[in-house]
């Protein structure tokens, strides 16, 4: 019995074409990395290098004084620095988890069940994607006022549950799961909860990882000054913004504050990026 060797299929491109693609990707990568590197460099620059003319891209004499001054300034504030961190972490964590649970459950119903008004409801969600967050601030404030949620965590957490992006993205991925797979699970005696958790959610891993990245980025950078008045409920970006607006002497502290704010979303993105690419490459079960 002869073994048949399967030849690896090569893309129909020349070496020049591959080189052009690599060069283009490198240029785009540099274009997006330069602002990030410049921000990190500014966080470690002393004041004399920050206001140097012509400006210097990389720091020559790195210092941690900016981060030490940031801790000193935050420790002297009316509310402890840890309180701002706790508010932001709580809002980001609860808002992201709630957004994933509600969005994925609603997407599963819309993708795999046909019921009266389902298409119209999804059309409303798609229409909501066109509205900017600034347009919704006044209606959201009026609703929060009626509910008595102004100056509470609920004013920031609950609206995050209903963001339409998560529902839209999850539904598009769930529609790719074969109905035969779900029907086979039902024949084997699996309940809806088990089908949803053990079959549907693992197959849409790229979707909920992407939704997690977007939700964390949105909530971590949320200032909340429109709905939050008490200082003990304010978010970390709002407190850091007040420090950066203090004047020229706080320029180094402002650079350190900017790095602190952007650090968490970048770490989450780096950690989830490989999982997204791996799952996208290995998934794709279709009828």
Image (cartoon, rainbow, N blue to C red):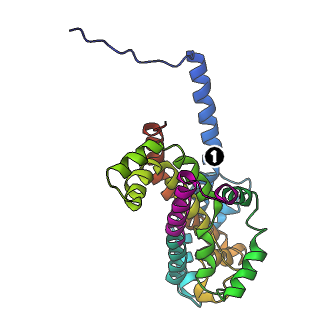
Whole-percent x and y of residue 196?
43, 57
Q: Nearer the viewer, residue 102 or 36?
A: 102
- Residue at the spot 60% in from the left edge and 86% down from the top edge: 152
Q: Tell me if 285 is positioned left or right of 126 in this view.
A: left
Is residue 89 inside the magenta stretch?
Answer: no
Is residue 96 inside the magenta stretch?
Answer: yes
Whole-percent x and y of residue 267?
49, 58
Whole-percent x and y of residue 265?
54, 60
The answer to whether residue 213 is seen in the rendering is: no
Q: In this view, does 85 lie above or below 126?
A: below
Whole-percent x and y of residue 281?
46, 37
- Residue at the spot 67% in from the left edge and 54% down from the top edge: 119
The answer to whether residue 157 is seen in the rendering is: yes
| Image quadrant in which you'd find residue 189 | bottom left
Task: Give the residues drawn in magenta, as a range.
Answer: 95-121
Quarter containing the N terminus = top left
Q: Which of 194 and 71 is in front in this view?
A: 194
- Residue at the spot 44% in from the left edge and 47% down from the top edge: 203
What is the magenta segment's predominant secondary structure? helix
Q: Is residue 104 above or below residue 5?
A: below
């Amino acid at each position: 019995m002869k073994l048949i060797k399967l030849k690896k299929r090569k893309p129909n491109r020349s070496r020049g074409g591959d080189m052009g693609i690599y060069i283009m990707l490198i240029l785009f990568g540099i274009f997006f990395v330069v602002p990030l590197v410049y921000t990190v460099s500014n966080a470690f620059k002393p004041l004399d290098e920050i206001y140097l003319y012509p400006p210097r891209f990389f720091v020559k004499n790195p210092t941690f004084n900016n981060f030490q001054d940031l801790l000193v300034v935050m420790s002297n504030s009316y509310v402890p620095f840890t309180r701002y961190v706790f508010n932001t972490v709580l809002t980001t964590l609860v808002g992201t988890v709630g957004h994933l649970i509600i969005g994925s459950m609603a997407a599963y119903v819309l993708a795999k069940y046909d019921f009266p008004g389902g298409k119209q409801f999804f059309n409303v969600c798609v229409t909501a994607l066109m509205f900017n967050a600034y347009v919704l601030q006044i209606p959201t404030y009026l609703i929060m006022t009626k509910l008595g949620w102004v100056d509470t965590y609920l004013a920031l957490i609950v609206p995050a549950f209903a963001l339409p992006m998560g529902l839209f993205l999850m539904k598009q991925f769930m529609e790719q799961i074969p109905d035969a797979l779900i029907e086979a699970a039902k024949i084997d005696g699996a309940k809806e909860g088990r089908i949803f958790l053990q079959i549907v959610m693992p197959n849409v891993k790229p979707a909920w990882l992407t939704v997690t990245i977007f939700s964390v980025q949105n909530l971590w950078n949320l200032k909340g000054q429109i709905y939050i008045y008490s200082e003990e409920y304010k978010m970390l970006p709002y407190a850091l913004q007040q420090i950066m607006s203090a004047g020229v002497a706080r320029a180094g502290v402002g650079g350190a504050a900017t790095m602190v704010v952007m650090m968490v979303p970048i770490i989450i993105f780096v950690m989830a990026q490989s999982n997204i690419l791996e799952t996208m490459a290995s998934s794709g079960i279709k009828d």
